[in-house]
Image (cartoon, helix red, strand yellow):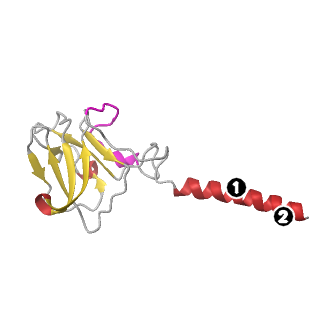
Amino acid sequence: MKNFGIIFLSYLLIFSSVVFFSCKKEKAGGGSKSSAYNDNSSHNVGTACMNCHNSGGSNQYWWTVAGTVFKPDSTSLNSNSTIYLFSGANGTGNLLLTLPVDVKGNFYTSSSVSFGSGLYPEVKSSSGEIRYMQSPTTNGNCNSCHNSSKRIIVN
């Protein structure tokens, strides 16, 4: 009977560990992932990235911030730009996150981001033009609002 108890507790411990670690993962695949200049591996330009890249989604990574940057014609991609998240409007306050924009115009990260009462995005093109979002955002699902009628645009 004593051996049965030890075996039972061992199985219970293994089962509990599997359930705990599978439910606590912030993203499948381990580690964090972010966009990179000149990278060509992203996909689904202009769509709401977090429809798939979330805890209930079908993709390997779960983004905390993601979106697509376009040129003023709203169809050409603005690759190799940079996204900044500040605690204050118009590039003021603390710089909390810097994200490179890849070749397909996409930016993304699975790193933890605390939006608190809101962060202020800035986008800077590779040519140096800067555009600010005037209102704070409390989530990083950028393409959910910046869809085909309200793109993230910088020259």
The N terminus appears in which quarter of the rendering? Answer: bottom right
Which percent across, then down, holds residue 100?
A: 25, 42
In the rendered image, residue 128 lying in the magenta stretch gets the answer no
Which percent across, then down, holds residue 7?
A: 82, 58
**Residue at the spot 25% in from the left edge and 36% down from the top edge:** 37
How many numbered discs, if any? 2
Secondary structure type for disc 2? helix
150 sits left or right of 38 in the view: left
Distance from Cα at disc 2 to Cα at disc 1: 14 Å
Q: Is residue 78 above or below residue 62?
A: above
Q: Is residue 36 above or below residue 11?
A: above
Q: Which residue is mark 1?
A: 14
Which percent across, then down, holds residue 79?
A: 20, 35
Q: Is residue 124 above or below residue 92?
A: above
Q: Which mark is residue 111?
A: none
The magenta-colored residue range is 38-53
Can residue 76 be seen here? Answer: yes
Q: Amino acid at mark 1?
A: Ile
Can residue 48 be seen here? Answer: no
Main SS, magenta region, reads: loop
Q: Amino acid at mark 2?
A: Gly
Q: Answer with mark 2 or mark 1, whichever residue precedes in sequence.
A: 2
Extreme-front residue of the structure: 94
Looking at the picture, tell me which residue is in the foreground, 9 or 141.
Answer: 9
Q: Tag 1: Cα neighbours inside 10 Å, few (<14), some, or many (≥20)?
A: few
**Residue at the spot 37% in from the left edge and 56% down from the top edge:** 112
Secondary structure type for disc 1? helix
Looking at the picture, tell me which residue is in the foreground, 24 or 68.
Answer: 24
Q: Which residue is mark 2?
A: 5
Q: Tag 2: Cα neighbours inside 10 Å, few (<14), some, or many (≥20)?
A: few
